[in-house]
Image (tube, grey):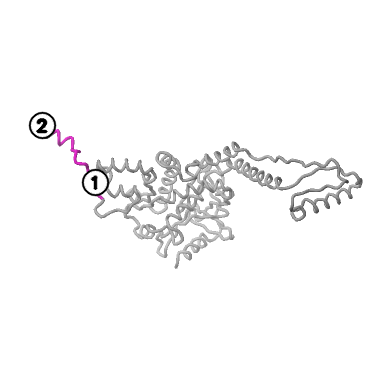
Amino acid sequence: MGFLERFFARLQGKPKGEYQGRFMLLNGQNVFFPRFSGEIYEEQRVRAAIDAIARHISKLDVKFTGSAKPVTQTALKARPNMVNTWSQFLYRCATIYYAENNLVMIPIDDDKGNVVGIFPLLFSRCEMVVYGGIPWLRYKFRNNEYGAIELDRVGRMMRFQYKDDLRGESNGPLWPTMELIGVQNTGVQAAVKNSSNYKFMARLTNFTSPDDIKKERERFTEKNLSAEANGGGILLLPSTYADAKQIEMKPYVVDADTIKLIDDSVNEYFGVNEAILKSEAVGDAWSAFYESIIEPFAIQFSEVISDMLFTPREQASGSKVIATSNRLQYMSNQDKLNVTQQLVDRGIMTINDALEVWQLPPIEGGDVRVIRGEYVNFNERTNQNEDV
């Protein structure tokens, strides 16, 4: 049975029969996960911010430690499933996480019950129900198909968690900014359209009937103001028009300060800045971005995947999933040179560690630590002097 067959069989196979009720939290609320609608992702500024974060998260290195569940570790070390590489998987997970503040991942089993894949869910509806005395996650896809899985097998990542125990808050605080962005775009479009049209006001001397005035206005517009009729840009008025004047339109256009305020609001919501969006952040600036955005995601991701794959006993014995990144790779070249030179000379970093910082391949025999000749062990030197 292939991956897709196992995947959809898992979604549609359980549970069967009637549910015994919806799962209730301690506060008495039913658990409904917000649907994956993706509205904010359709706005250019928001998508740029999420993309900048997801691109850096996709560079995390997913490693497995310990010896528990060798079949699972062998299957997942190369890729998380048969559809995505780890880079693609991380990018998609980060995009869903930041667009919806919730990420749900499910394990995919082989015929023997071993986990051989992990897949992020995109659903139109998701709720927790009780079946067989235990909570299940029941979800509906956009094609109206349903799936379900035991809650304790699901991996859940949350952002802005406050009121609910099992899910993050919505993007409601961002909607006023999204509305301003919509008004801004509409205003710019209207300004462009208005600036390309003639607008005149004149007094008709020989027309009194409202119908005659309407017909004359339509005739004059068609004969003089259309692109086909007025290609030369010259407007000639007959004597029936008096006091003709052009109306100068001055449409409102959002000023630069307001645009910056809107952009800053989006950036602050997602924890990015112009240097991150333009891929110009290096050194301390990138380290600050890593520690505030990338590292929290990596820690939560590592813990959630570890709980999905390994029991608490197996994790206590050292079997875990760890998502890491070498932050030194994102320093400026001068900073890289200073760091690698100082750390290699003192035996803190191996030769291959230094090559990794410079994004160069490791060399044979490079996993050794070297120390400059003028460095000696302080205790040994002290003992030698005492013997003398």
Magenta-colored stretch includes residue 377: yes
Magenta-colored stretch includes residue 10: no
The disc, 2 or 1, on the residue closer to the chain's N-terminal end is 1
Q: Position of residue 75 (x, y in %)?
A: 38, 60
Residue 191 is drawn in which quadrant?
top right
**Residue at horizontal 51%, vertical 59%?**
15
**Residue at horizontal 45%, vertical 52%?**
90
Which quadrant is home to the N terminus? bottom left
Is residue 93 rendered to the left or right of residue 374? right
Residue nearest the observer in this picture, 56 or 212:
212
Residue nearest the observer in this picture, 383 or 32:
383
Q: Position of residue 235 (x, y in %)?
A: 79, 48
Residue bearing the label numbered 2: 386
From the viewer's perspective, is residue 131 above or below residue 248?
Answer: below
Mark 1: secondary structure = loop
Q: Which residues are magenta?
A: 367-382
Q: Amino acid at mark 1?
A: Arg
